[in-house]
Image: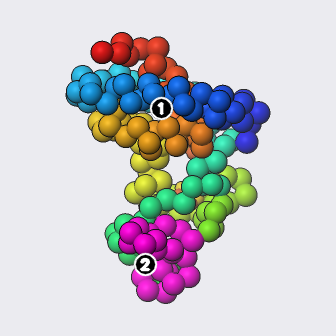
Amino acid sequence: MKEEYKNYLLDAIQSKKENELWLRSIRNIKPETLYDTIKQVHKQVFEQTDCMSCANCCKTSPPLLTTEDINRISKALGMSAKQFSKAYVLQDYNGEKTFNIVPCRFLLSDNSCQIYDIRPEACRRYPHTDELEYPKRTQLNVANTVVCPAAYNILRKLKSKIALP
Ligand code: SF4
Ligand code: SF4
């Protein structure tokens, strides 16, 4: 990972408590009133972020898998959903399913994704920073800032743009 991105993550760890408090304070603002700002900041930050120089999400955070994900990916790999699940999927006590190892087995050495076009929905949406529900997801957002340099930068920019109630 780029030094610059490592430094963002160190900053994110140091400011985690403060960021969590800020995220808590926007929970009561109507998400609709923040949505344009959130989408705009997400777009700006990702235009300046090189995910191919990072891939930290794929290296550290196994995505949640839906039944559709498992069916789609297993079919493309020529496996049954059952075979795929047995080989690659872990299910926790809540019934939530993820890939069973990190770094992700589909992450290639150049940081590209072997199954990019059919990747899990959670990979497509990560780090969930352009979604209407962003202001409501305090724990998810703060957790993502210490994994994803873009998520941290989005939060930093939002803090300078959103006036607290
Ligand atoms: S499926 Fe692709 S995008 Fe998703 S974690 Fe694995 S390598 Fe990353
Ligand atoms: S989404 Fe975030 S963690 Fe994943 S590669 Fe891009 S900058 Fe890195």
Magenta segment, which residues? 81-100
> SS at mark 1?
helix
- Determine which quarter of the picture holds residue 107: bottom right
Q: Observer-nearest residue: 122 or 118?
A: 122
Is residue 90 on the magenta stretch? yes
Residue that appears at 38% across and 30% down: 24
Which of disc 1 and disc 2 is earlier in sequence?
A: 1
Q: Which residue is mark 2?
A: 75
Q: Is residue 7 visible?
A: yes
- Determine which quarter of the picture holds residue 94: bottom left
Give the amino acid at mark 2: Lys
Q: Residues within 10 Å of mark 1 (few under 14, many from 20)?
A: some
Q: Which residue is mark 1?
A: 20
Q: Is residue 43 visible?
A: no
Residue that appears at 45% across and 27% down: 21
Q: Observer-nearest residue: 74 or 131?
A: 131
Q: Position of residue 40 (x, y in %)?
A: 39, 24
Please determine whether, in this image, residue 66 is positioned above or below residue 25: below
Quadrant where the N terminus is found in the figure? top right
Q: Which mark is residue 125?
A: none
Is residue 113 on the magenta stretch? no
Give the amino acid at mark 1: Glu
Q: Is residue 47 left or right of residue 27?
A: right
Q: Observer-nearest residue: 24 or 73?
A: 24
> SS at mark 2?
helix
Q: Position of residue 146 (x, y in %)?
A: 60, 39
Residue that appears at 44% across and 51% down: 124
Q: Residues within 10 Å of mark 2 (few under 14, many from 20)?
A: few
Please determine whether, in this image, residue 101 is positioned above or below residue 34: below
Quadrant where the C terminus is found in the figure? top left
